[in-house]
Image (cartoon, coloured by chain):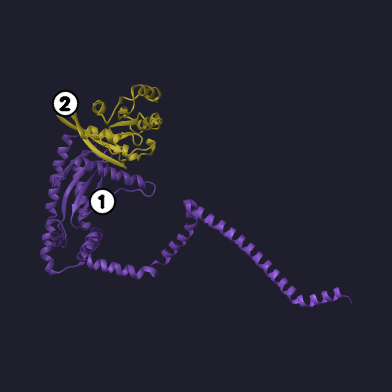
């Protein structure tokens, strides 16, 4: 063994550990380099994402399309679970509002509730009146004898006579209106309504509208219009119709009597054929209508 | 003096100035805010002719593209018709001949006065051009805004209705 070989052997022995650790270090450095490269790639991807998001955010349409589904889902959820989420708070708020702003609350609701209540009461009362009438038809007692006699001579039933005073029925106005043109043939008014020609026209337009709207569904005529305390009863004749504006509460017997009375008036005082609606016809029909309604009111003890 | 009532209807496409013509004739004013007529509105005015007072009950019918779409019952009992179109809007007079024919079938005895309205929106040369393309010659060119010829439209119709009544 020569000197050189011995030296190499010695070197190998002495540096073996060094070499091993150098190799490990090199490997670690390589791993770190790779990791850094991966991280760089990831950063690039994130950068692109951020840039895309920035673009979306600045573009209303894109941003909307991304955000909309989230909002929609939330709204859907709220719709379904609103009561669960906010029911208690809403209840408490309304309670507090009603407690502290009672006057405003009543003022707001009264027009709606008031009308509903009034209609309901009127409806119930009509029913009640009808019920009383039906029962009285069958009833007999000496106590009612005088009332029945009085009613008989007045041409009305005793039960009608009894409740009539408190019903405050009133024929406010009556219009005889040409069926096709809506021209006013005659009128009676207890309170001088402003423009009876326009009322006649508009009533005819309403009738025409209803007729046109329901033509294919059902054959018929508009018979009643209700507005607030007024009830307009419409009686149809061949060439014209009579619209009577009434206030108060009345039953079917009253209506039947009025129908009969108007039928009688029509046959006697309104010409069958009307060529022109002129002042002579108007005055003649109006005059007779007034007498006729006054007769009816007197007969019916209104 | 005898007083006689007559139903008059104003027909024509939407936004041609029917309501404005009535407003000018009945109330002597022009409504600057356009409000479309829903369904029908009714006004009245009496005119005196030949010792007779004609109480015109004027039905202002909401405008439709074609008169065939107007509820049939609105025409019933009409003694006269004013058909209005807008001189500045050709689509309002393209159907004029068919509309007039339709009305004549509904109301064979009723006189019809044809009116080209909004004359104030056209200069003389344009007006002449429009006249040359009209399917029917109107009885009057009017401006409800300026009041031009409005009174004459209703007077002519009143006269025609008296003649039919004789």
Which chain letter goes with mark 2? B
Q: Residues within 10 Å of mark 1 (few under 14, many from 20)?
A: some
Residue B25 rendering spot, x and y as whole percentages: 23, 32
Residue beneath disc 2: B51
- Foreground of the two, B114 or A242: B114
Residue A142 rendering spot, x and y as whole percentages: 12, 69
- Quarter of the image for the C terminus of chain A: give it: bottom left
Q: According to the colouring, which chain is yellow?
A: B
Up/down of A40 relative to A231, above or below: below
Outermost residue, front side = A3
Residue B55 rendering spot, x and y as whole percentages: 20, 33
Residue beneath disc 1: A225
Residue B113 visible? The answer is no
Residue at 23 percent of width and 28 percent of height: B151
- Foreground of the two, A49 or B98: A49
Relative horizontal placement of residue B98, taking residue B39 as reference (left or right): right
Q: Residues within 10 Å of mark 2 (few under 14, many from 20)?
A: few
Secondary structure category for the residue under label 1:
strand
Q: Quadrant of residue B11?
A: top left
Secondary structure category for the residue under label 2:
loop
């Amino acid at each position: 063994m020569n000197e050189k070989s011995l030296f190499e052997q010695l070197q190998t022995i002495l540096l073996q550990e060094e070499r091993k650790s150098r190799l490990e270090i090199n490997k670690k450095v390589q791993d770190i380099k790779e990791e850094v490269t991966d991280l760089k790639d990831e950063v690039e991807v994130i950068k692109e994402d951020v840039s895309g998001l920035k673009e979306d955010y600045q573009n209303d349409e894109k941003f909307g399309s991304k955000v909309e589904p989230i909002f929609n889902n939330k709204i859907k959820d709220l719709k379904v679970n609103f009561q669960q989420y906010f029911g208690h708070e809403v209840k408490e708020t309304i309670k507090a509002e009603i407690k502290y702003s009672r006057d405003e609350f009543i003022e707001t609701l009264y027009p709606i509730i008031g009308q509903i209540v009034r209609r309901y009461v009127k409806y119930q009362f009509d029913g009640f009146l009808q019920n009383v009438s039906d029962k009285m038809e069958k009833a007999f007692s000496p106590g009612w004898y005088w009332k029945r006699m009085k009613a008989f001579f007045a041409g009305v039933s005793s039960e009608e006579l009894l409740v009539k005073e408190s019903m405050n029925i009133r024929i406010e106005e009556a219009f005889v209106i040409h069926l096709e043109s809506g021209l006013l043939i005659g009128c009676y008014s207890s309170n001088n309504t402003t423009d009876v020609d326009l009322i006649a026209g508009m009533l005819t337009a309403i009738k025409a509208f209803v007729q046109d709207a329901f033509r294919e569904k059902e054959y018929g005529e508009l018979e009643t219009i209700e507005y607030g305390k007024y009830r307009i009863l419409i009686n149809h004749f061949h060439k014209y119709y009579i619209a009577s504006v009434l206030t108060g509460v009345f039953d079917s017997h009253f209506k039947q009597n009025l129908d009969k009375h108007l039928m009688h008036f029509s046959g006697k005082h309104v010409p069958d054929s009307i060529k022109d609606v002129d002042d002579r016809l108007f005055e003649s029909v109006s005059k007779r209508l007034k007498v006729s309604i006054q007769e009816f009111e007197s007969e019916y003890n209104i | 003096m005898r007083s006689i009532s007559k139903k008059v209807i104003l027909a024509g496409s939407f936004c041609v100035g029917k309501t404005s013509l009535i407003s000018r004739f009945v109330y002597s004013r022009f409504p600057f805010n356009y409000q479309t007529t829903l369904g029908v509105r009714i006004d009245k005015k009496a005119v005196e002719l030949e010792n007779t007072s004609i109480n015109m009950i004027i039905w202002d019918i909401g405008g439709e593209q074609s008169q065939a779409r107007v509820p049939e019952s609105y025409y019933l009992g009409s003694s006269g018709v004013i058909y209005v179109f807008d001189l500045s809007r050709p689509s309002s007079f393209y159907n004029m001949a068919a509309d007039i024919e339709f009305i004549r079938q509904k109301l064979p005895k009723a006189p019809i006065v044809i009116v080209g309205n909004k004359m104030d929106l056209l200069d003389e040369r344009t007006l002449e051009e429009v006249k040359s393309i009209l399917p029917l010659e109107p009885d009057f060119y009017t401006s409800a805004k300026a009041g031009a010829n409005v009174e004459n439209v209703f007077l002519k119709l009143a006269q025609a209705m008296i003649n039919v009544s004789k």
